[in-house]
Amino acid sequence: MTIIRSDLVIFKPELLGDTDQSGGQRTNNKVTSGLLNDLFDPISDIDHAQSAVEIVKCYPALNTLGTEKLIGGHIFISSPPVDPLVTTMIVEAGDLNDNTRMPEMVDILESAVKPGALINGAGPEFVPFQDSFSSKYLTRNESGTSITTYLVVGDIIAITVEYTGNESATYPRLEHICQVTGVSLAVNGVVTFSPAIETLTPGPSISINSQSGCTKIRKTTTVSQLTYHGVKELQTSATLGSIELDVGSTTQQIIPTVPVQYPYSNQVPGDGSRLVTKSAILTATIARTYLFTVPSLLAVGSAKISYRPIVTYTVNTGSGNAVYSNAGMTIGSGTVSVTLTNAPVVGTPITLSYLSNTTYLNHSYVDPVPDDMIIVKNTVNSSIVYNGSRVSCYEEDDAFYIYLGAPTFEYILAGTFNYTTGNFIAASASFSAFQFTSLVSFLNGESNFSFALPFSNPRLDSFNVRVVNLVGTLLSGSSDNLGDIAGTGITGTIVNGVVSLTFSSAVDLSTLVYDVIDIYKTLPPASIFGLDPLRMPTGGTVSVFQKWGVVAIQHSQFQVVASPAPAQVKTIRTNARFADITDANNVSLWTVGNTHFTVDLDAGTVTINSSFPGFTAPFTLVDTIGELGLVANVNTDSLLLASELTRTYPAGSTVASVQNLGDLQAVVGLVRDMTSWGNNWDIDGTAATANLNTAAYPIEVSNAGAINEDWVIIFTTGTAFRLVGKNIGQVATGDTLNDFVPINNVVGEPYFIIRQEAFGGGWSAGEAIRFETFAASRPIMLVRVVESGHSQITTDRALISFRGNEA
């Protein structure tokens, strides 16, 4: 039989809504085309106020009484909601099956975020409801190298308890995902996070199964096996023969977010140590490896900071640009080679911050401090002889100390230090032979300076900067919302997050501080909508287009059909893919016999055949042009196709990523017989003497009745048997003397039919027959996200298209 338009339907599951029982098997209840809220609930005022996520399951299906095949069935969201606060997407998951219900769907969505790269491998002891840790834990030592991880507000991190062997009752293994809510890199600074940890964790010295340092602080990584499909509108027209589609953004939010303004005060450029860093800036391309030429790079020797260059770059997160830092790089003579962990946003700056030998030099205690230089605080690496033994000294703001250790575990004063001359005055005769290495800086000041703001979305008009010149006068400046900086003795700009300053007189850059407000998106708690947002990839921002995925490009135009009457002819675009007439309630007037209109797509005409009795005016004629394309590359705001467009699409056309459902046709899998059934769905038993004659009498299925199920027929006597499904349990009994026609009560059609002649004879009690049936449908998962905010749109919808080719 020919497949007609009405044979392609989308069925509802057993239960819609947001209860634990929502989802389940396919029903015979069709999603009515044009009917609002037939899958999703209406959006309430509470949804708009606090945000909402709704998850539904449905079944695109070829619904015929035969076994016709729909080749290359596919589904996509062909039109986005009009409300900018509402988005809809399809989530493609290999674990989604006919039996999946809401708890499993939530687990599927929350499976993406896992603990990743190490921040500190010997973290502190956390007590229940603790929500902070010292910023000193952002630094760890590896093979004598100090490595610091720079966090910003909004980052997602993991606190874990990791060890091998038996699990400790006191310190169970833990994986706590949380969001950074505050960062201070000052002395005694802290990192705050939310939600608070609820479990006691072991301190660095606690041993579990002979392993210490079991509490670890990590970054997070996304390991999602999910594919997300969404829809965007063309921002500019795509002409015939072009391969680039300007879609504005290639990401969507699967979790609602709330913008928050976070103020940063008295910030210091660079790593927060008040070391003055120079910047080398390159423009990002699609490459990951970049070579910076920095001939003034200072190779830091034995100063305690062991400073390495820091590279910052921008990664698109959909809702904004996140700033990333890389610690690993190759430093050569005058060059720094950097390989980025993540793909940068093309056209944005990649900034390398480094210590310059025009600002600093390495210094040793045996050399006099040059007249034009001064020792830099917090860079002094020192030791002293105490009671005949050389011990390490610890530099504090006021003086130098040594640590006695057991049994007193106390710090005692070793002496004071002159940073101008390098002279040390011992606290007592017990101390002698002070030695040190450090950095020294020039005293001639700087007239200009550039640095990168390490924030994802700084509010430009909140930026202000202060610095003291060499004669002690305070200079200051502020930015407007365009990034132009002006003030007393300071001018400059902020472009793509890079601050460039010019001073009216030479300044001491170690005194430079700035304030700025960063706007980031925070995630509402899981209790609001039943999903843990911290376990969503990149804070809930997901790419809805995939390299080597298929997209549908479409444009629809509309015209009013006034006073319809037979023989009227309406003109549409030639070679359109689709045309339809709907009434005021979005009900289609199409029928199999063309009762109300006839479409000639090749000629570009629609002929009216009636006055549309029984339908409500006004009537709208729509014609849609479109094509499918293969995506060769996904950028942050555009797609590149593998082949040229076959026609022109104006701005506002839709571009949707497609979920490929494959061929849809009810079929029966391999049939096997067994001497016994051990209730083991993974292994077949020994073959029986009797067998089902499916060569002469194949098991019959229909697209309307078949389901995705693994079946077993278990003989209770030589002629009687019962039918059990792996997912749905026992559904029927039968015998070999009659045709076996178990009815799928959900749809009112047989699951399958086995003719009496196929059974033959010779069966014994306990023997079994196994086979699978495959439905002409696939379950899909839809997610609708409502962002918090006010909306003037009272009626909204998204359109889903389901298509394929006839075999």
Image: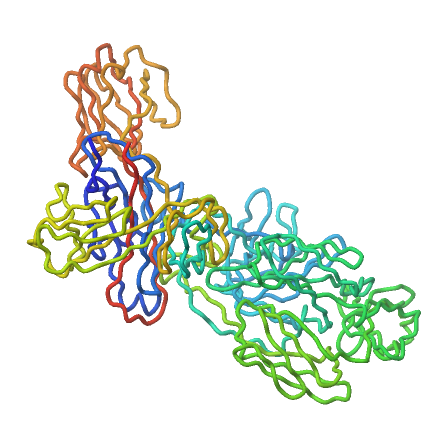
Q: Quadrant of residue 139?
A: bottom right
Q: Position of residue 698 (x, y in %)?
A: 24, 19
**Figure quadrant of the C terminus:** top left
In the rendered structure, the answer to whether residue 10 lies left or right of residue 289 reads left
Q: Nearer the viewer, residue 130 or 773?
A: 773
Is 702 above or below relative to 84?
above
Do we see residue 406 in this rendering? Answer: no
Q: Nearer the viewer, residue 514 or 672?
A: 514
In the rendered structure, the answer to whether residue 172 lies left or right of residue 369 reads left
Do we see residue 178 in this rendering? Answer: yes
In the rendered structure, the answer to whether residue 662 lies left or right of residue 218 reads left
Q: Nearer the viewer, residue 768 or 16?
A: 16
Name the residue at 53% across, 50% down: 172
In the rendered structure, the answer to whether residue 453 lies left or right of residue 552 reads right
Q: Position of residue 284 (x, y in %)?
A: 60, 59
Is 688 above or below relative to 241?
above
Q: Position of residue 151 (x, y in %)?
A: 59, 64
Q: Position of residue 668 (x, y in %)?
A: 29, 26
**Figure quadrant of the N terminus:** top left
* Model colouring: rainbow
Q: Quadrant of residue 762?
A: top left
